[in-house]
Amino acid sequence: MSTDTATPPAEQPDAAENPPPRPGFTQLFGRYLIEANSVMVTVYSLLLAFLIGAVLLIVSDENVRSTYTYFFARPQDALTSSWILVRDSYLALFEGAILNLNTLERFQAGTAEFGDLLRPISETLLNATPLIFTGLAVGLAFRAGLFNIGAQGQLIFGMLGALAVGFSLNLPAVVHLPLAIVAGALAGAAFGAIPGVLKATTGAHEVISSIMLNNIAFFFLVWAIGTGFFHSETKSELVTKPVDESATLPTLLGWLGAGLRVNLALIVGLAAAVFTWWLLSRSTFGFRIRAVGFNAHASATAGMHVGRTYASTMAFAGGLAGLAGAALSLGVGSSGVTTNTALEYGFDGITVALLGRARPGGIVAAALLFGALKAGALSAQPDVPVDISTLLQAIIVLFIAAPALVKAILHLRTPRGGMVTLEAKGW
Amino acid sequence: MATDTQVPPAFVGGSAPARHMKAGVTHAVLGLFLIAIAFAVLGDDRLTHIAFDRTLTDLDWALPTQGIVLALGAITAAIGVWMVLGIPQRRFKPAGATAVTAFVLAILIWSYSEPGAVFRAESILAGALFLAVPYLFGALSGVVCERSGVINIGIEGQFLMGAFTGVLVANITGNVYAGMVGAMLAGSLSTMLLALLATKYQVNQVVVGVILNLLALGFTSFMYDQLKKAEGLNDAYGIPTLTWGPLADIPVIGPVLFQQKLVVYVGLVLVFAIWFLLYRTRWGLRTRAVGEHPAAADSMGVAVNRLRFWNVTAAGLISGFGGAFFTIANSLAFNKNMTAGLGFVALAVMIVGRWNPLGVLVGALIFGFTTKIAQDLDASGSALVPGEFLQMLPYAVTLVVVAGLIGRAKAPAADGVPYNPGDK
């Protein structure tokens, strides 16, 4: 389907007769800025998304909206209140994700610890961790031409798998923690393989089957938490037993302050990204994934098992999403898992993978960005609606997926070699 | 469920008996399972109660559960054996359908034999038709889009936009019907974006569809939180149930057909209207041509991308109206993600209906019935299956149906393929 990735024009300007003057750095850079290449499309997508977000904030805020009723009498009221609203909202996101200016002042005055200063960053990294895994889960499948929107369900099964091992076995930490993580990955892989196998054997489209499995997984989670095996022995509400100390993920920055929750799973996530990169670009399996994703018919003609590749890619992707689940259930500490622990990390994996253009490096960067957005939104609620992160993410990736739209809105130039877009197959 | 195996081409369509090992064994096993259940689980004193709860309220049928399950199990098993031994080709499909129906019926009769459970036939059938409405609208929207060659995975998002905007407009104007129009326009606005990206910018439709779902989810959830701060923007508005005078008193048919809300009738009319438009009008011919072979349509003077754009935009009116089901037709206020993936179930309904409005009606009724049964069994507290598993049922059925059908149900040939007139 994606056959026509525009090849650079083959015209050779008569360079020998009339060499054009070499453009200087400023000129090249300026040209780069007004070109729809992937870097600038990303930058402009972010800017446009925050702009649209600002408009929505203004439109939906009752107090600010009321100042627009007398806009023509006193425009400065409307403009000032809009500006203050947008500034405060985005500042709240920034303070929740990067650096709290209030804490900075207290730190300078000597009333806050250095650890307090790091808390927003730690929250960003904590929220980015599952996104790295789910982003990789979606991105890897993308490379095989599969649109895995089932990361949420795979994550839920990973969560339950890791949890089951995490509280039921009695082992030393050296064995227990890795075992619990592996259990999460395997549970996710088993669940993730289903849409792949269905596609391979029956041709069922993975978008529908994986979204159905998401819903099934959610109800399974609600049921599982209520069962005697998982349900907390001390609390009456719908919450599971906590994992043992020996299976809890150790915090990375805990020695700097008590509230720094970012844990070892971040390192595992980065390792998974490196491994996925290696897998995709250096291994035979990865070659097969890319070949099938590029042209399934040609790969089949070349003797590759397309169906088997679909199934194993989905299992692998499910395993990655399962690791996200393990990171969540082994990271929550003593509080146990609820039906709400998974949030929307699986669905966010879709936006992460699209922003990261299905490349491991890009996915890590996108996960950090969206992790920051999520951490900011979680800390800024209820002043700013928490779903502003979902909204901004969706707008950003809409532009990323449709670079031609960004190009048209901002009158950018077509870059040499065409624009990068992502493809997923129809029925 | 019935899988064809190794049918020699010469026999296809003929009446010579052919063996169907996989399908036969599956049916035989299902039948034996029922027989085993009948003897092991069901005692001979178990009764399944069927009531006509709205018209003939004092009638109560009590059927012997064990005997019926046994009989249905025997039928299923017998058909399985027949398939293994060799079945005339033209009898294969009807036989498979009979076996599956018998199996489902047996499971139903078993479920409603639990102590305290009563199959309230009229309420359940009327509820099934009502619950078929969102599937119907979503799938019809999908049919219009995909017949024009654009994949609409964003039905879920259009539902959400319709559900949200419907309530908002109803609250602002104080008129529930204005709310329904608002829902249609909101759905249309969101498909217009899809149409623009799919035709003018030739973006991948599956990717954009999924993103539009996320966008709708983010937008409606965000607005929900913002508007919650003000009074009177998300109050529940409902529409009345229409009762057709004496017609509503006919047993079974009355409560099911002549005592429903407006949305049900709109849906039924729309099925036939779209069928007529697609197969009996010039617009329909052009639309189908554009979905099957856009280059040919183009050479006959049809403006492919313009037709696609307006068809997809119009389809949004349908799915947006379907969104109003969740709030207005149910007299509910908007809530975050209240459509809960049913937009995707609607896509499965479209596939079951093989991209044909009449087929879609049948599919929607099956799914509406499944959903209603799951809700009813859950509410009656029948202990056979945990409630969570009943809630999974529509999704699980979708999974099975999509897996079982998609290979054989054929999508329009140019479905999802952007058309660039310069590429010829």
Image (tube, coloured by chain):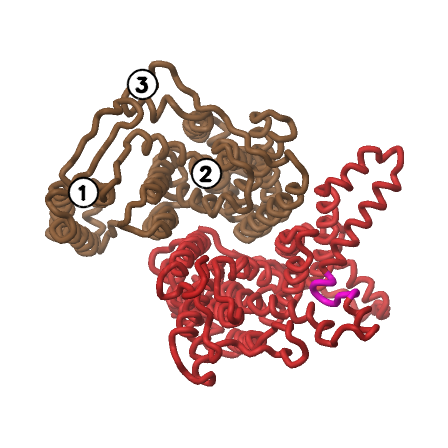
Residue at 39 percent across and 80 percent down: it is: A170
State the extent of the magenta-drawn residues as a range: A94-102
- Identify the element where label 2 is drawn: helix
Residue in view at x 81 percent, y 38 percent: A67
* Labels 1 and 3 in the same subunit: yes
Labelled disc at residue B95: 1
Predominant SS of the magenta segment: helix
Read off the chain for label 1. Answer: B
Question: The disc labelled 2 sits on which kind of residue?
Answer: Val
Chain letter of the residue beneath label 3 in the structure image: B
> Do tags 1 and 2 sit on the same chain?
yes
* Image x and y of residue B305, in percent: 58, 40
- Residue A33 in magenta stretch: no
Q: How far across and how far down the image is residue A341, in percent? A: 52, 61
| Disc 3 residue crowd, few under 14, some 14–19, many 20+, Cα 10 Å | some
Viewer-proximal residue among B162 and B351: B162
Question: Tag 3's secondary structure?
Answer: helix
Residue carrying label 3: B249
Q: Which mark is residue B143?
A: 2
> Percent from the top left, x then y, of residue A66?
78, 36
For chain A, the rendered hue is red
Q: Note the chain letter of the brown one.
A: B
- Mark-to-mark CA distance, 3 and 2: 35 Å
* Within-10-Å neighbours for mark 2: few <14, some 14–19, many 20+: many
| Image position of A335 (left or right of A98) | left
Decide whether residue A101 is among the magenta residues.
yes
